[in-house]
Amino acid sequence: MTDMGVTQEQLQKMALQIDHVIDLIQQQDLDKGELMESVCPIYRESAKNLIHYAAFRSFDARKMQKGLKELGFTRLANAEGNILGSLINLKIIVNTLLGGAPDLTKNEFLSIGEGTQILKKHTNELFGESDKLRRVRVMVTQPTEAATNYNLVLNMVKNGMDCARVNCAHDGPEVWQAIINNVRKAAEECSTSVKVAMDLAGAKVRTGKIDLGTRIKGKKASRKRINQFIRLHKGDVLIVTGKENSSSLIGYSNKEELMKPARIRCVPPHIVNRVEKGAPILFDDGKIEGEIMETGPESFQVKITRAKEGGAKLKGEKGINFPTLDLGISGLTDKDREDLQFVIEHADIVNYSYVNDAKDVNDLLSELKNLGADEDLGVILKIETNLAYKNLIPILVTAMQRKHLGVMIARGDLALEVGWKNMGMVQEGILSFCSAAHIPVVWATQVLEGLAKKGMPSRSEITDITSSVQAECVMLNKGPHINEAISFLDEVLLNVESSHNKKEVLLPRMEWK
């Protein structure tokens, strides 16, 4: 029995477990040595720590953590930034209690707290040094109006915007340029720094534009344009086709019997040849769910399995997700390659949409090199597919060839891909592995959506902000009340950070009046 009330047997068992995990990590050092050579020098230690953390997570640490807790030691729950150093520190403590000293000559590791400092450095290099009291940055999606309304942009900067996001899926170079000019001008007027990040549209599958034409209405035979959407109910059949100008409504007989199902186009059209019978399909951010019933060379048939009561409207240019299928459409599109020429000339950061694997990352890096992009251009990888999550480690290591790097958790598409019940675990995994790689994370999708769009936040949105301090940046989407949302987020983040440092809960003095 030691002075701590812990038996020698408990300590010896713990020492063996720690040694086992350290051996796993050291083996990874030997196996991945060549891979480390391709990494940018400033990420060399980060890449090693990422591989170390991956080795640690290949071991089921739950029993070990329970034992550590019972002994009053660290449970390694927040140690991803310097995992080997934390394990070595634990080994020293246990061996000291056992009356010995461990041999540490073979180990090179980051000391406790060093990972946090490296992450802070990488965050500053990507988003710029912050002149604000809060650690977490605020990224704001720019509406088209930002091109012509300077005061709108100026107030965004005054209210706390650190990074302006311009989405290449909308508008065009003339509008983008006007938005960027307003952002730069507003930042200068406020004597602050605001980075410009531009999203490549990426290879997203969407519904095609709907054109249902016009109809004659009234005695004077005036023409009125038909509402451009298809209303779908549970049990309806929808034909998805690759043909242009092929949208049509559901047709019923006088007895309300189905005569013909509705039709809608998908883009890109070759998707119709990649789907599989029985696979689930989601439309418009999961608002409509279906199952693929039949496939053919030019179209496939979907049975709607979930839609809101009274029917859900499906409009053109809405997202389509296939959670269980690999459609083979990742990487840069022709539009992305064209838009990149504008991005590298005018933006500080390029946001890479729908990256799925290391090959996609290399595709972007090669294109940046071909276009002569400045090495200081930041790259943010948007993790929004199940494949990207599964390939996260090779994606991160490959991307570490760039100097300034970030990851965005694009929670909208990602939740549809991995399933709602898995989203919390997946989000936690991305945060942990990016912390291990010392790569800043952007917390995105529907943050304060109610406040930005309707002027009133929901209770769950407030809770979401509290969780968002685990990241280095929070992204807001556009809305008529966007400046209220920025100001509110700025204030709440500042308050929350006083009691939270990433995943770690701090304990300030509590006062009750």
Image: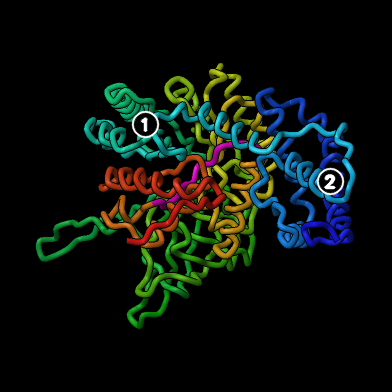
Q: Measuring 74% from the left and 45% from the top, which residue is drawn there?
A: 54
Residue linked to disc 2 = 96
Residue visible at 54% across and 58% down? 416
Residue 507 in percent (x, y) is at 50, 53
**Which of the 4 image quarters holds residue 232?**
bottom left
Left-right relation of 115 to 413: right
Depth check, mark 1 against mark 2: the one in front is 2
Query: Is there any visible trace of residue 435 in the rendered image?
Result: yes
Q: Over which residues does the magenta segment extend? A: 436-447
Furthest residue to the bottom? 255
Residue 296 on the magenta segment: no
Taking 74 as reference, is 495 left or right? Answer: left
Q: Give the crowd class for mark 1: few <14, some 14-19, many >=20 residues within 10 Å.
A: few
Asked whether, in this view, residue 377 is left or right of residue 157, the answer is right
Residue pictured at 82% horizontal, 49% vertical: 94
Element assignment for label 2:
helix
Label 1 to label 2, Cα distance in Å? 65 Å
Q: Quadrant of residue 365?
A: top right
Crowding at mark 2 (Cα within 10 Å: few <14, some 14-19, many 20+) = few
Q: Position of residue 38 (x, y in %)?
A: 74, 26
Q: Is residue 480 above or below residue 191?
A: below
Q: Quick check: can you spot residue 243?
A: no
Please report whichever mark, 1 or 2, sits nearer to the chain's N-terminal start.
2
For the rendered model, the colour scheme is: rainbow
- Give the residue pinned by disc 1: 172
Residue type indicated by callout 1: Gly
Q: Residue furthest left?
A: 220
